[in-house]
Image (tube, rainbow, N blue to C red):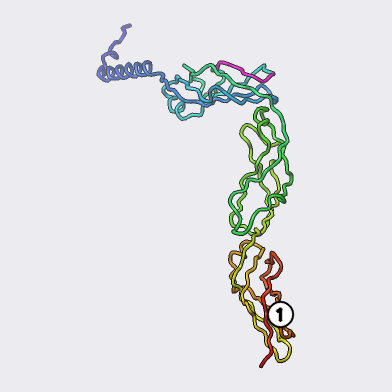
């Protein structure tokens, strides 16, 4: 039986090209089978139990060098990588240090390896978690319409205090918490709103974290002097007599909503001096003023001199 070796020489050109391609591909795979990439990865540190809280870390980000098969390069570049270290066996507040290890990483594929971590040594500060009752303040933004104001003394909140949980060092510095911003711009009437309580960083509000607020909007009161108010005689003197105002203009100080006072002009006011039935003589007659609603005199009504004479 003869062994036929012709298959080695048949189509030798095609076989040679195939061999060269196979060898080239093998060298490509072997020589480029892995790549390295360095990424900035956020670090999360978990407290050992609910009675302690992480208030400070020496770093919040790590520079990590990864090694990956070339075919996973796109996965490594765009994939989500997280680092989470769980502190174990610590019971009291204070500083605690640890080394970041590969076990703290969540990687998109098991073939990816960690080559270098910087910094690998991290220090954290742990603080006691407490609950503190704090009064709630409304965070007002802007101002009501001109001539109106918020009556701060009668603002009502239900509830008016909140239980806040967080690190002792943070809560000891707080004497109140605020609501989310509440717009006042252009308001002229009282109103009621339900608003959320603003969360202070590193803390949280126990419960629903909301409060109902009643905001009283009131007219802002002021005083203003109005001059040159024209006074007219009112009524008829005694028979065969006539009345003459020695002075027919007065000034008064009015009190009321600022918005009304600022728009008020002297000609908007009606002023009279009562002369009905007066006999001959000179009188200091009180002036009667007809004022717009919500405005009042600050002092007693002014008087004007009136002369009553007999007709000739």
Percent position of residue 208, x then y: 70, 41
Residue at x 62%, y 61% (from the top left corner): 258
Q: Secondary structure beneath disc 1?
A: strand
Q: Is residue 97 one of those drawn in magenta? A: yes
Q: Is residue 59 left or right of residue 150?
A: left
| Residue 128, picture quadrant | top right
Q: Which residues are magenta?
A: 92-99
| Residue 25, picture quadrant | top left
Q: Is residue 28 left or right of residue 248?
A: left
In the rendered image, which quarter contains the N terminus?
Answer: top left
Residue 222 or 92: which is nearer the viewer? 222
In the rendered image, which quarter contains the C terminus?
Answer: bottom right
Which residue is labeled 1 in the image?
A: 274
Q: Is residue 164 one of those drawn in magenta? A: no
Residue 119 or 152: which is nearer the viewer? 152
Residue at x 72%, y 49% (from the top left corner): 156
């Amino acid at each position: 039986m003869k062994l036929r070796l012709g298959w080695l020489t048949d189509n030798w050109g095609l076989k040679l090209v195939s061999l060269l391609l196979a060898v080239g591909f093998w060298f490509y795979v072997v020589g480029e089978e892995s790549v390295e990439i360095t990424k900035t990865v956020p670090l999360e540190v978990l407290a050992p139990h609910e009675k302690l809280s992480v208030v400070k870390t020496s770093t919040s980000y790590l520079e990590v060098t990864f090694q990956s098969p070339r075919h996973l390069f796109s996965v490594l570049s765009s994939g989500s990588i997280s680092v989470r270290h769980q502190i174990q066996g610590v019971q009291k507040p204070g500083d605690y240090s640890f080394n970041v290890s590969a076990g703290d990483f969540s990687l998109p594929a098991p073939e990816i390896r960690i080559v270098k971590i910087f910094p690998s040594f991290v220090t954290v500060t742990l603080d006691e978690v407490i609950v503190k009752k704090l009064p709630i303040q409304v965070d007002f933004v802007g101002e009501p319409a001109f001539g109106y104001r918020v009556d701060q003394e009668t603002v009502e909140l239900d509830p008016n205090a909140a239980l806040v949980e967080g690190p002792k060092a943070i809560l000891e510095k707080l004497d109140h918490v605020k609501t989310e911003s509440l717009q006042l711009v252009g308001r002229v009437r009282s109103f009621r709103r339900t608003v959320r309580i603003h969360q202070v960083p590193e803390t949280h509000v126990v419960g629903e974290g909301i409060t109902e607020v009643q905001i009283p909007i009131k007219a802002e009161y002021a005083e203003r002097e109005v001059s040159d108010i024209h006074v007219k005689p009112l009524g008829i003197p005694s028979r065969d007599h006539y009345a003459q105002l020695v002075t027919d203009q007065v000034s008064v100080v009015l009190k009321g909503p600022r918005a009304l006072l600022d728009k008020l002009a002297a000609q908007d006011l009606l002023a009279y001096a009562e002369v009905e039935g007066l006999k001959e003589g000179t009188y200091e007659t009180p002036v009667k003023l007809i004022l717009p609603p919500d405005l009042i005199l600050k002092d007693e009504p002014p008087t004007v001199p009136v002369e009553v004479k007999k007709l000739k």
